Image (cartoon, helix red, strand yellow):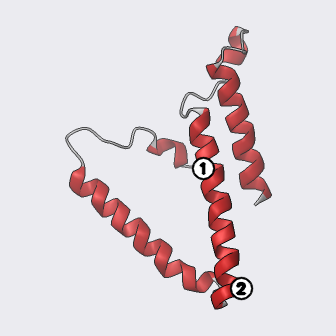
């Protein structure tokens, strides 16, 4: 939790500083993350917090463990990937997929 929240919060701040042109030195501009806007990181953090809240709620209400969530997550990923592949045109709609690669 801490790694995800701190990392994305720092990236959001850096992205915001770069978009607002608060970074002026040439060597620092080269370090600006050009992949995503601050709104992307804010959405990512919000979705993570909502997911953690939903997991806690379902754990107390239905006594669900991560084992019950795994098939749901795999199913959603499969459906989304299938949808993207069926609707994909000649160009690749995943402009920033390399950002997720290690």
- Residue 51, image x, y percentages: 62, 65
| Residue 37 left/right relative to 79 | right
Residue at 45 percent across and 45 percent down: it is 97
Which of the two marks, 1 or 2, is nearer to us in this view?
A: 2
Name the image quarter holding the N terminus.
bottom right
Q: Residue furthest top?
A: 25
Within 10 Å of disc 2 (Cα), the crowding (few <14, some 14-19, many 20+) is few
Q: Which mark is residue 44?
A: 1
Q: Which mark is residue 60?
A: 2
Q: Secondary structure at mark 2?
A: helix
| Residue 75 left/right relative to 57 | left
Q: CA distance from mark 1 to mark 2?
A: 25 Å
Q: Secondary structure at mark 1?
A: helix
- Residue 84, image x, y percentages: 30, 54
Residue at 64 percent across and 43 percent down: it is 42
Q: Residue 32, located in which quarter of the rendered image?
A: top right
Within 10 Å of disc 1 (Cα), the crowding (few <14, some 14-19, many 20+) is some
- Residue 48, image x, y percentages: 64, 58
Residue at 70 percent across and 23 percent down: it is 17
């Amino acid at each position: 939790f801490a790694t995800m929240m701190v990392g994305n919060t720092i990236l959001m701040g850096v992205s915001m500083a770069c978009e607002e042109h608060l970074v002026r030195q040439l060597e620092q501009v080269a370090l600006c993350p050009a992949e995503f806007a601050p709104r992307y990181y804010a959405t990512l953090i919000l979705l993570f917090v909502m997911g953690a809240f939903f997991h806690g709620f379902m754990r107390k209400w239905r006594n669900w463990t991560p084992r019950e969530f795994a098939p749901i997550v795999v199913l959603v990923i499969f459906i989304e990937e299938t949808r993207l592949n069926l609707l994909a045109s000649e160009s690749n709609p995943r402009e920033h997929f390399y950002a997720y690669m290690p």
